[in-house]
Amino acid sequence: MRPEDILVPTPSGVCCKPGGFHIDPTRPVDKALITHGHSDHARAGHGAVLATQETLDIMRLRYGDNFAGSTQAVAYGETLKLGDTTVSFYPAGHVLGSAQIKVERKGLRIVASGDYKDVPDPTCLPFELVPCDVFISEATFGLPVFRHHDAAGEVSKLLRSVALFPERAHLVGAYSLGKAQRVIALLRAAGYDKSIYLHGAMEKITAYYQSRGIDLGAVEFVRGAKKSELAGTITICPPSAMTDLWSRRFPDPVAAFASGWMRVRARARQRGVSLPLVISDHADWDGLTATIAATGCSELWVTHGQEDALVHWAQTRGMKARPLDIVGYGDEEESENPAPPEGEA
């Protein structure tokens, strides 16, 4: 049996014909298995959605109660029979509720990773290595130049700046699902116990993380705070908010941005970021290559990102490898441009 007899790339995403489903489809389909709640993977309008409970909850928060015709929560390690395949979900270490999806038929095992990282994160379960024959890997940071810094060290850099400029506010651009909550948890781990301010776009997701037992300490929302009260504070906000009228309420703000893309200085300059923080929820080059090798796969499929470099790396090590070239996935940190919620100017 060939892997293509189980999964095939289509314009709608990866399709499993013998199982009757798609994984992270980019267009509405009858049955979708969703790896995590980021908008480039989790879309509304499917007939049925199967995902972890956290991912279903996050989709409901973002899209409303009727985001799909029906939903089914799948626990980590649970095995489902879908058509002629068996399917199971495993932690991906990307954000709360993120999952790798293993699809098996007649002894052939394919694991679709979704997005993943292989470093500790206090806000979600760690990545679980799943042996397989074919591994479908993301490649967001799939170039050797991308070697992420230690996240705790990046947070220490932020705290040194806060101590150095007590009269200024620090704005940290971060994606509202996963990155924002991780930055808060990292600040708490570093001993920062003051209130952390949030843009209103972070409200629902952050409250949901707290409801799932993620300890983020005291958080407040910027609306209503006086400009003078925000001196010496840290505020987490969507990247787009740092350059709009909303940011003018802060005293002489220092612009920080938590992203793996801050490894590229030109990106920081383009965004007007004076304090780049290399904190990513995606595996870097070393993480990608180490994970792929550890799965024991003999074939690699690469999607969304720097596909060619990772394909070449795998081929030089004797693996079969191919890019999937599916249009519709991208880096959610770059594409996010949320409308402020009611009451948040």
Image (cartoon, helix red, strand yellow):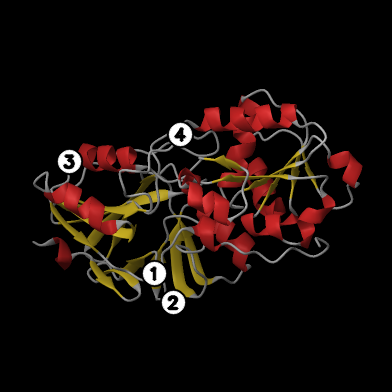
Could you give the CA–CA distance between mark 2 and mark 3, rounded to whole angstroms?
A: 33 Å
Q: Residues within 10 Å of mark 2 (few under 14, many from 20)?
A: some
* Residue 317 drawn above or below residue 305: above
Residue that mark 2 sits on: 28
Give the residue at the far top of this rendering. 191
Q: How many marks?
A: 4
* Image quadrant where residue 27 sits: bottom left
Of discs 2 and 4, which sits in the foreground? 4
Q: Residue at x 43, y 36 (%)?
A: 126
Could you give the CA–CA distance between mark 2 and mark 1, rounded to whole angstroms?
A: 7 Å
* Residue 148 drawn above or below residue 23: above
Element carrying mark 3? loop
Q: Residue at x 55, y 38 (%)?
A: 123
Earlier in the chain: of badge 2 and badge 4, it is 2
Q: Position of residue 289 (x, y in %)?
A: 26, 41
Could you give the CA–CA distance between mark 2 and mark 4, rounded to whole angstroms?
A: 38 Å
Residue that mark 4 sits on: 149
Q: Position of residue 46 (x, y in %)?
A: 46, 73
Residue that mark 3 sits on: 296
In the rendered structure, which amino acid carries the disc numbered 3? Gly
Closest to the observer, 78 or 28 = 28
